[in-house]
Amino acid sequence: MPLGIPEAMEEEHEELHQELRYATKMRGRVGAAAKRVAEVLHPHFERENELALPVIGVARELVEGKSSPDFPKALELADKFRTEYEKMLREHVDIVKTLDELEKAAKAAGKQAVIRFTRKLKAHARTEEDLTYPAVLMIGKLLKE
Ligand SMILES: [Fe+2]
Ligand SMILES: [Fe+2]
């Protein structure tokens, strides 16, 4: 696959985005708490879509020993991501804090779909910390060799 966000990962981001948008339109505390999630999440997603996820796009070619004209650009992105890595992790902490508040509000209002959304987004962040982000860093290392 060339440099580009893998389809399933793009869909996952898009789906989370839609679900959050739906929650921001709710009245009262749920809507207000959802808006606070959106404020911290939106710039974070953008940076992931720009710096991290396209690098994953070249992972298969790289590990299968093929070459690609996209490797230099992927290396450039992976290097940029490395400088942002700590900040991205801190943003996850902030995002989870706003999600805890949203989950509380959703529980009080009996909004099951919103409760499920908060858990889904937390799991998404953990997968990135355990798998996606390390993969981007490893791809950067391999591309340097
Ligand atoms: Fe993400
Ligand atoms: Fe993230």
Image: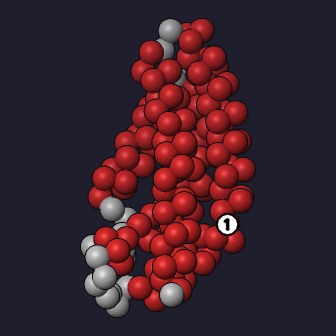
| In the depicted structure, whether residue 139 falls above or below residue 115 | below
Q: In x, y percent, where is residue 62?
A: 36, 78
Q: Secondary structure at mark 1?
A: helix
Is 1 on the left or on the right of 23, as rendered?
left
| In the depicted structure, whether residue 6 falls above or below residue 90 | below
Residue at 54%, 44% (x, y): give it.
Answer: 125
Residue at 56%, 17% (x, y): give it.
Answer: 106
Q: Which residue is mark 1?
A: 84
The quarter holding residue 33 reads top right
Residue at 32%, 87% (x, y): give it.
Answer: 68
| In the depicted structure, whether residue 61 falls above or below residue 12 | below
Q: In x, y percent, where is residue 67?
A: 31, 88
The quarter holding residue 81 reads bottom right
Q: Which amino acid type is marked by label 1? A: Glu
Q: In x, y percent, where is residue 103?
A: 59, 21
Is the residue marked by circle 1 packed among few (<14), some (14-19), or many (20+) residues within 10 Å? some
Tally of numbered tags: 1
| In the depicted structure, whether residue 88 falls above or below residue 114 | below
Of residues 141 and 47, the one drawn nearer to the viewer in this rendering: 141
Applied colour scheme: secondary structure
The N terminus lies in which quarter of the figure?
bottom left
**Residue labelled 1 has its Cβ within 8 Å of some atom of ligand 2:** no
Is 99 on the left or on the right of 22, as rendered?
right
Q: In x, y percent, where is residue 41?
A: 59, 47
Of residues 21 and 7, the one drawn nearer to the viewer in this rendering: 7
- Can residue 122 be seen here? The reply is yes
- Can residue 32 be seen here? The reply is no
Residue at 65%, 26% (x, y): give it.
Answer: 100
